[in-house]
Image (tube, coloured by chain):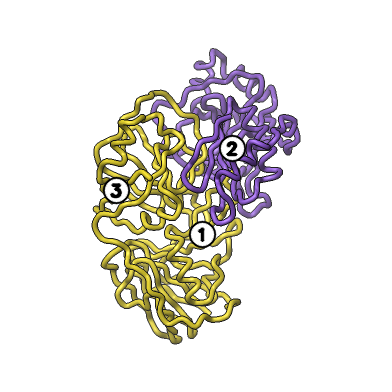
């Protein structure tokens, strides 16, 4: 664990990998250190934003060092099913990049549970990982200027669902009719760190 | 009680202190770009610090009071506005903000606060995420809330004007300063960066001699805070302001210290910024 300053009001905790990130995030979000207003997990890091009027970065660093990560907490998130129409524009290409047929890709995508590791990019955009499976999909060489909302996509070790229309460079394999971000719903974000997702075939 | 918008200038948005505590869901804080100026505006009309104000970019806002309202502006001083001096705007009276002589962002606070419906706990317009109230448009009728705090007995708050010309702020090494090494840090702190016209609420885009990376390769996305100096492959840093992305995949060479970000939010295109190592 490395603690790196991020300006005068935030601390970046660098860890060895995603499992360590999730375990530390679970502990820190359950009991944030005094004066911490935001805890942001990412691929290799956890960022703690503080209120400088209330605490110091040294005090927060001490609190982080004294925190016991909770690797068990990963298994306590909500569990949801997302029906997907596997008709994405990049399905064939993504399958080929993985050495699979399109049917094989769908089988693998639906075959095991995914977990939201962290969010970012846009409100409600979750980075989903499939523990034990090695996904490694390059991004598109040239990002699309418009990706339709509900698009289910792959990039690197992650799968994701675009909450709204936005530019994007991920490989599109399908789409879901479920709104992953809806301001008129509580909570607005369906995919939160720790949420477990099972993709199911909704037809092609 | 309400205000009718007669003109907006280049950009007027409703802002408050934003949405802290939701970054883990990909929802950034957003809120006012210059927190100190907006906070002063609210105090001068007896509002709580989290009341919503109008953030006016480069003047041009015109409003009509539909009731007697106590108003004030802070930040960039606009001709025609009651600057740092709370004033009653009578029902039917209009207030027109001219272009400021220095600075970029002015805050118009109304006693009672701008009372548009909150979105996810805040009335801030986040232009990057597309969250919160719509950008203020001509013809909008903005509701004004009921005052809760006592009216302050202050006629005028002496405040410095935003600087013209070159501005210097303190910079701290960022988490990826080692991607640029000593030569990169020397280049960051040793030149006057020019603020470009592509700057917005997301960030100030800086032009100058590009910073060179010592390390190549990809950085996995990581959390960002306002004040970050993120360096994309062009080598030209972007200084993140209120609507910055929650996470980013380009290395952050340094951070402008939190209090100095307010100063940076008042820089206009063409002004120069020096980043002094502290």
Whether residue B263 sits left or right of residue B70 in the image: it is left
Which residue is painted at 40% across and 40% down in the image? B254
Task: Give the SS element for disc 1.
Answer: loop
Which residue is painted at 54% across and 73% down in the image? B47
Q: CA distance from mark 2 to mark 3?
A: 32 Å
In the rendered structure, find residue B274 and report the number of the disc placed on it.
Answer: 3
The chain holding disc 1 is B
Whether residue A38 sits left or right of residue B35 in the image: it is right
Q: Position of residue B222 (x, y in %)?
A: 51, 36
Mark closer to the observer (1, 3): 3
Say which of B52 and A173 sits in front.
B52
Image quadrant where one finds the C terminus of chain A: top right
Q: Is residue A181 above or below residue A134?
A: below
Q: Position of residue A119 (x, y in %)?
A: 58, 39
The chain that appears purple in the image is A
Which residue is painted at 33% across and 46% down in the image? B276
In the rendered structure, find residue B74 and report the number of the disc placed on it.
Answer: none
Task: Give the SS element for disc 2.
Answer: strand
The chain holding disc 3 is B
* In the rendered image, residues at marks 1 and 3 fall on the same chain: yes
The residue pinned by badge 2 equals: A41
Circle 2 crowding by C-alpha within 10 Å: few under 14, some 14–19, many from 20? many
Whether residue B69 sits left or right of residue B208 in the image: it is right
First in residue order: circle 1 vs circle 3: 1
Image quadrant where one finds the N terminus of chain A: top right
* In the rendered image, residues at marks 2 and 3 fall on the same chain: no
Q: Position of residue B199 (x, y in %)?
A: 33, 50
In the rendered structure, find residue B124 and report the number of the disc placed on it.
Answer: 1
Q: Position of residue A8 (x, y in %)?
A: 48, 47
Chain B colour as displayed: yellow
Which residue is painted at 35% across and 25% down in the image? B214
């Amino acid at each position: 664990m490395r603690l790196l300053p991020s300006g005068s009001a935030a601390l970046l905790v660098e860890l060895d990998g995603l499992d360590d990130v999730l375990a530390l995030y679970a502990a820190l979000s359950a009991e944030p250190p005094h004066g911490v207003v935001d805890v942001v997990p990412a691929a290799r890091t956890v960022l703690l934003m503080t209120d400088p009027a209330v605490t110091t970065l040294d005090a927060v660093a001490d609190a982080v060092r004294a925190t016991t990560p909770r690797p068990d907490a990963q298994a306590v998130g909500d569990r949801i099913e997302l029906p997907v129409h596997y008709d994405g524009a990049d399905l064939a290409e993504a399958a080929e990049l993985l050495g699979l047929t399109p049917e094989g890709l769908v089988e693998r995508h639906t075959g095991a549970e995914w977990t939201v590791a962290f969010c970012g990019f846009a409100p409600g955009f979750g980075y989903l990982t499939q523990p034990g499976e090695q996904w490694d999909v390059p991004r598109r060489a040239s990002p699309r200027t418009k990706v339709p909302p509900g698009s289910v996509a792959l990039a690197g070790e992650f799968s994701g669902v675009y909450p709204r229309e936005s530019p994007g460079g991920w490989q599109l394999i399908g789409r879901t009719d479920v709104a992953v971000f809806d301001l008129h719903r509580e909570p607005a974000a369906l995919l939160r760190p720790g949420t477990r997702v099972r993709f199911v075939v909704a037809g092609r | 009680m309400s205000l009718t918008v007669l003109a907006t200038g280049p950009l007027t948005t409703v802002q408050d202190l934003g949405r802290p505590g939701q970054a883990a869901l990909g929802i950034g804080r957003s809120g006012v770009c210059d927190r100190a100026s907006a906070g002063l505006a609210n105090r001068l009309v007896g509002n709580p610090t989290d009341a919503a104000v109008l953030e006016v970019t480069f003047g041009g806002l015109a409003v009509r009071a539909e009731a007697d309202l106590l108003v004030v502006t802070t930040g960039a001083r606009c001709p025609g506005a009651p600057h740092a001096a709370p004033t009653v705007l009578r029902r039917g009276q209009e207030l027109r903000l001219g272009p400021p002589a220095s600075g970029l962002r002015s805050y118009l606070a109304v006693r009672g606060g701008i009372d548009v419906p909150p979105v996810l706990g805040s009335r801030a317009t986040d232009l990057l995420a597309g969250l919160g109230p719509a950008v203020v448009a001509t013809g909008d009728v903005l509701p004004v809330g009921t005052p809760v705090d006592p009216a302050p007995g202050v006629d005028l708050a002496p405040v410095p004007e935003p600087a013209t010309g070159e501005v210097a702020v303190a910079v701290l090494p960022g988490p990826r300063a080692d991607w640029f090494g000593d030569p990169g840090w020397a280049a960051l702190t040793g030149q006057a960066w020019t603020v470009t016209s592509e700057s917005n609420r997301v960030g100030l885009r800086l032009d100058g001699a590009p910073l060179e990376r010592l390390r190549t390769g990809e950085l996995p996305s990581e959390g960002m805070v306002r004040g970050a100096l993120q360096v994309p492959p062009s080598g030209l840093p972007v200084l993140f302001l209120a609507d910055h992305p929650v996470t980013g995949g380009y290395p952050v060479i340094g951070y402008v210290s939190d209090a100095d970000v307010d100063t940076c939010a008042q820089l206009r295109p063409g002004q120069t910024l020096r980043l002094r190592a502290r």
